[in-house]
Image (cartoon, rainbow, N blue to C red):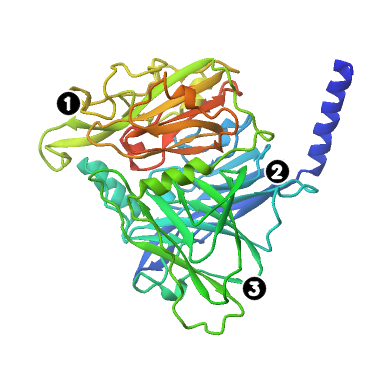
Amino acid sequence: MSPFFLFLLGILSFIASLADAETHYHDFVVQQTPVTRLCRTHNIITVNGQFPGPTIAARNGDKLIIKVTNRARYNVTLHWHGIRQMRTPWADGPEYVTQCPIKPGGTYTYRFTIEKQEGTLWWHAHSKWLRATVYGALVIFPKSGSSYPFTAPKIDVPIILGEWWDRNIIDVLRQALFTGAAPNVSDAYTINGQPGDLYRCSSQGTVRISVNPGDTVLLRVINAALNQQLFFSVANHKLTVVGADAAYNKPFTTRVIMLGPGQTTNVLLTADQPPARYYMAARAYASGQNVAFDNTTTTAILEYKTATSRTSSPVLPQLPAFNDTATVTQFTSQLKGIPSLAKVATNVDENLFFTIGLGLVNCTPGPRCQGPNNTRFAASMNNVSFVLPRKTSLLQAYYQNIPGVFTTDFPPSPPVKFDYTGNVSRGLWQPRPGTKLYKLKFGSNVQLVLQDTAIVTTEDHPIHLHGYHFFVVGQGFGNFNPKTDTAKFNLVDPPVRNTIDVPVGGWVVIRFRRRQSRCLAVPLSHRFTSHMGLGHVFLG
């Protein structure tokens, strides 16, 4: 077959795909809304007065146009978490990275196309901690005429896990940034915005999902919590995992799943138990040493329509202990990709090694110096504590060649090699601030090692790569050893993700292809440490 004929077929296929695609228009108004939880009413920031915000539904190949009007008193941006922003980096959303914030009274329109993605993603604010209440599901169905690679569900419902603070979330952040100490932990976890029966003043709003015996239910579980990894389970029911981060995986069955902040997992559940009421529940997985966390449990109810009693107490699932790393490791090791849908690169053009950790900055004792031993908490990658610009976005500075906004001297490996998860010299505790970027070659296959460190303490780190997906080819505990650990890489069926948790005292290796020119991929921490400098920006 001639090259011209192949080219013509490609053009015709592309035109046919455009004919099937739809354009969806949404108007989002960011506003203050009174919401009552835990016996108290707070004015929180929402979209269209809804908490959680509206669910966006589209098909693979569709275009989304979302006009955002900011009627709140804070600057805001929105991020479409997991969308592969092909040729649309301005639509990604992180504040002062791909755009300047939408000021109070302002508007901004996001335009992007969903390309080769199916499953569950989500959207959220990407300014300060507004993400605590400004979020919603983004559901991507197969193209018209296509089907799921599993039995079509009778019921399809997003399950959004979140965190709730019994005070103004911006005040919580401001206090932590002012004092230099860790922020207050949340007061409750939520399922679709509701804490559930186990909290005070919460039973009336508990989320309920009604099923008939034999129904197949697709639960699109999203961890929208700011800071916390979460276990999730449904009492007496098995969960079949069929997708994660809008990528299909080889199905496997489990009793419990674990999601880091920002991750999504699609699970199938069959209503095959005696008709009754069953709790679905979520609570913390927290394995960091000396790290405070919210140790409560949020619930929703799966109720059979044929149950003889609607007043009896639902059955509660047996969730793992908060520090059950063995269960987490078993779960993550079962997640395998489908090679026919996405193939990992076997050759590497750029090999990067990023250490991740907390730090302590010396300061003058006083109200703004309330970290351990008269210090302020900081965080870094390769000992660089990332500083966002305040007036110009990085993408604008890059496109318009504006000097003085960033430098391109981010180190591709740690400036100082050390025992990353062992006893760390205090000379490494204080990172250097800077807006340092690393330039990737267009078209290169990139391997990135993400290594936790024991600087101050070991801790898990949820990392999200904006606008991209990646393959998780390896992970483990201790220090990454390129000689022995590389031989164990999964280059056959690695899972595809857009967000990964670097384990406590461990490492993760990901691979991705630098497929876009003149745009930015941003590996950012998905919790408070991003405000302390844990983040980085790639240039193309």
Q: Position of residue 509 (x, y in %)?
A: 46, 28
Q: Position of residue 436 (x, y in %)?
A: 38, 21
- Disc 1 versus disc 2: distance between alpha carbons? 50 Å
Q: In this rendering, which labeled residue sits more in front, label 1 or label 2?
A: 1
Q: Is residue 237 above or below residue 144?
A: below
Secondary element at tag 3: loop
Q: Earlier in the sequence, mark 3 or mark 1?
A: 3
Q: Classify mark 2: residues with Cα within 10 Å, few (<14), some (14-19) or many (20+).
A: many
Give whichever of 324, 470 is nearer the camera.
Answer: 324
Dot 3 corresponds to which residue?
Answer: 212
Q: Position of residue 194 (x, y in %)?
A: 44, 65
- Disc 3 versus disc 1: distance between alpha carbons? 60 Å
The amino acid marked with disc number 1 is Arg
Residue at (53, 48) in percent of width and height:
264
- Disc 2 versus disc 3: distance between alpha carbons? 30 Å
Residue at (53, 37) in percent of width and height:
498
Q: Quadrant of the C terminus?
A: top right
Dot 2 corresponds to which residue?
Answer: 60
Q: Position of residue 64 (x, y in %)?
A: 66, 44
Q: Is residue 435 above or below residue 22?
A: above
Residue at (52, 21) in percent of width and height:
446
